[in-house]
Image (tube, helix red, strand yellow):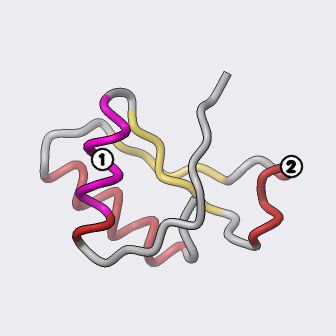
Amino acid sequence: MVSSITHAIKGRDLLKNKGFKAAIEKTPGKLDSAGCGYSISVTSNPEAALKIINAAGIKVLGTYQRQ
């Protein structure tokens, strides 16, 4: 979960450039208490994706795993 649509777009594009399958999705309502509203989803290796996003200075408000 990221703090804005701008961060979601930047994060998605960064991850795609690094070879990840990444997409932007709406954060599920029950998890949106932080007020973010958008998440970046990846299909594999979320720990590595998180490190890349953090290193780029994109603020991550939380993470979750889809069922």
Most prominent secondary structure in the magenta stretch? helix
Please identify the quadrant where the C terminus is shown. top right
Q: Amino acid at mark 2?
A: Lys
Q: Is residue 27 magenta?
A: no
Does label 2 or label 1 sit earlier along the sequence? 2
- Tell me the SS state at disc 2: helix
Query: Taking 66 as reference, is 12 left or right?
Result: left
Q: Residue at x 46, y 65 (%)?
A: 8
User: Badge 1, how many Cα within 10 Å: few under 14, some, many 20+?
Assistant: many
Percent from the top left, x then y, of residue 59?
Answer: 45, 74
Asked which quadrant contains residue 46, the reply is top left
> Looking at the rendering, which quadrant does residue 19 occupy?
top left
Residue drawn at (53%, 73%) of the image = 5
Residue 18 at x, y = what percent?
13, 48
Q: x, y (%) of residue 56?
A: 24, 73
What residue is shown with label 1? 49
* Above or below, comparing residue 50 to residue 11 in the picture: above
Please state, as top left, top right, bottom left or bottom right, where the N terminus lies in the image: bottom right
Q: Secondary structure at mark 1?
A: helix
Q: Who is closer to the viewer here, 30 or 54?
A: 54
Residue type for callout 1? Ala
Q: Which mark is residue 30?
A: 2
Say which residue appears at 46% left-offset and 78% top-offset. 6
Q: Is residue 52 magenta?
A: yes
| Crowding at mark 2 (Cα within 10 Å: few <14, some 14-19, many 20+) | few
Position of 13 relative to 47 (above/below): below
As measured in the structure, the alpha-carbon distance from the residue carrying label 2 to the one carrying label 1 is 23 Å
Span colored in magenta:
45-53
